[in-house]
Amino acid sequence: MWIVHGCLLLLCFAASVSRALAQEKKPLSAIPEGFQFAGTWDCEGTFRNNKVHKAVFTGSLILGDKWLELSEQDVEPATGYLAKYVIGYDSEQKHLVEFDANNFGAAIYSSQEGWQNRVLTMTSPISDDSKAPYAGNRFLYSITGLNTFTVDWQISKTAALNWTQADHLTCRRKAAQ
């Protein structure tokens, strides 16, 4: 009888360990559970100098619905800023990556954690170049409602990473036309 109980206990332990390992191996997803970025978004907020910032974002799922593509076009100020952000899972590095291509430059960000409590934090590599305007920057995408999300750009002027708010946008889904 003790042998039977011991075998059952061992089987239960093995099953729980295999479930935990399976959960750990599940790749991060750029797509948050229960939220759809697809569509057009009106975004309003401020730059770090408190000037008005208005933009239109469009979102879609690409590459087999595994990658999130967000496009931004600034409306105010009318600088002509255009950007495309593509976020997905890098299976080799085992983290999320974001490619930021815009008409002023480009950057790459990453996240080891993925979506946590409806917030995705994408961080740039940290620079030790004393001539750089800041040592690091990051974007926080926060889901704030069924049809709203925010985008915050934060910077750190030091490699010790003391984050300060730079830009903030609140985005609301446009009604289907």
Image (spheres, grey):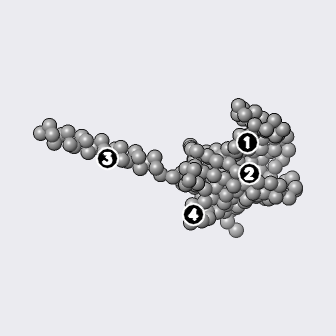
Q: Residue furthest left?
A: 1
Please provide percent x and percent y for residue 45.
78, 47
**Precedes in sequence: disc 1 or disc 3:** 3
**In the image, what residue occupies the spot 34% across and 44% down?**
16
Q: In terms of depth relative to the viewer, which is nearer, 141 or 89?
A: 89
The secondary element bearing badge 3 is classed as helix
Q: Residue furthest bottom?
A: 177
**Residue carrying label 4:** 65
Badge 1 vs badge 2, beta-carbon distance below 8 Å = yes
Badge 2 vs badge 3, beta-carbon distance below 8 Å = no
Q: CA distance from mark 1 to mark 3?
A: 42 Å
**Precedes in sequence: disc 4 or disc 3:** 3
Q: Is residue 93 positioned above or below 131 on the image?
A: below
Q: CA distance from mark 2 to mark 4?
A: 23 Å
Quadrant location of the N terminus? top left
Three-letter code for the amino acid on which mark 4 is drawn = Asp
**Residue carrying label 2:** 107
**Precedes in sequence: disc 4 or disc 1:** 4
**Residue carrying label 3:** 15
